[in-house]
Amino acid sequence: MTITIHVFGWHPGAKELIDLRPQNGGFPIFDQGHLGSCTANALAAAFHFTLHKMTVENHKDFADFTPSRLFIYYNERLVEGSVNQDAGAMIRDGIKTMSKVGVCPESVWKYDDQHDFFKQQPSDKAYELAQKCKVVGYARVAQDLSQFKMCIKNGYPFVFGFAVLTSFQTAEVARTGKMVMPQATDQQLGGHAVTAVGYDDFKQCFIVRNSWGEGWGDKGYFYMPYEYICHPALAHDFWAINWVEGFKNTTTQNPAKK
C-alpha cells in the first residue's frame, strides 16, 4: 500500500513577553488611599503612558506632567451626579470627561484622601489648565485576547474593571502580585479599575498596574491570568487612550485627523 505524504504549513506563533513598564519614564505607582478613586488613578496612569510615548516619538519635552487624579475623580462623579459621595465611577465617564474637560496637573489640584477634599469643585485655575491637556483619541477595546495583545504591542496600555474576590485580598497576592483564578470559597468584594501594561505568553498572564502603592504586589504591579481577564463575568469595560494633548504639544497634529 502506498502512503501519501502530505505537506503541512501551519505553526503556532512564537510566544512573547511584552512589558511597557520601562517605557513609562519612571512614573511612580499611585496610592489611592482611602478613596474609591481607582478609575481616576487607572486613567491618569494610562494618560501618562501615552503622553510619554508621544514625547519619545515626537521629540517633545512635556512628559513630566502628572495628571490630577482628584480632578478626574470629581468630574467623572459630576457626570454621574455623585460629587458628594465617595461612590467610585465608571471608566467611560472618566475618559469622556478627560476628553471634554481635560485634566489639570496634580501640582495644581493635589490628591488628598484623608478629608472631604474630594467633594470640592476644582479651582478655576485647574479648569483653565485642564483645557490645555486633553484626551484626543480613545477607543473601547473588545474583550478578546488578540485585541488586548495588539493594544499592548502597539505601545498602549488599556484600562479595565474587574471583580475583586476574596482570593485577591490575601497576604500572598499582596506580597507576590500573583493573582489566582477564582476559588470555590471565593466571594466578590467589589469592583476595581486598573491598567494593563504588558503580557507574558510564557506565564499566560497580563502585567497590570494597580493603585495601592509600590509596597503592594510586585512593586505596585500584579499578574492577571489570561483566563481571568477574558472571562466576561470577571473583567469588563476595556478602554485605551491613544492620543493626548499636552501643555507643550498643542501644535502636534493628530495623524487620525489627517
Image: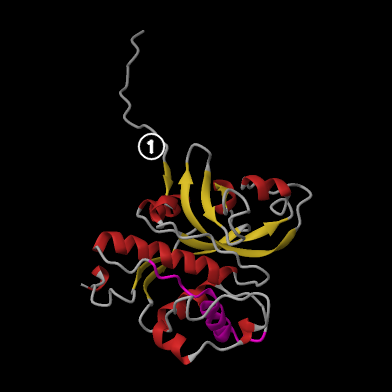
Residue 24 at what x, y percent from top left?
41, 57
Task: Name the outermost residue toward the left.
Answer: 258
- Which quadrant of the view contains residue 98? bottom left
Give the tally of numbered discs.
Answer: 1
User: Which residue bears the numbered disc 1?
Assistant: 13
Whether residue 181 is visible here, answered yes or no, is no
Q: Can residue 218 be seen in this view?
A: yes
Residue 23 in the image: state x and y as whole percent. Answer: 39, 54
In the displayed structure image, the side of residue 160 where residue 233 appears, left or right: right
Region of the chain picked out in magenta, as a range: 64-84
- Is residue 243 placed above or below 200 in the rendered structure? below
Q: How crowded is mark 1: few (under 14 residues within 10 Å), some or many (20 or more)?
A: few
Nearest the camera: 44 or 115? 115
Mark 1: secondary structure: loop
Q: Where is residue 102 in the image (x, y as percent from the top left)?
A: 42, 80
Q: In this view, does 22 lie above or below 5?
A: below
For the point 67% across and 78% down, the residue is 86
Q: Is residue 83 magenta?
A: yes
Q: Residue 186: within the magenta?
A: no
* Residue farthest along the top direction in this orientation: 1
Give the residue type that dot 1 points to: Gly
The answer to whether 141 appears left or right of 248 in the picture is right
The residue lying at 35 percent from left, 54 percent from top is 154
Q: Give the camera-side residue of 229 and 82.
A: 82
**Above/below status of 98 relative to 38:** below
Q: Which of 12 and 222 is in front in this view?
A: 222
Quarter of the image where one finds residue 255: bottom left
Could you tell me which quadrant the C terminus lies in?
bottom left
Residue 37 drawn above or below residue 234 = below
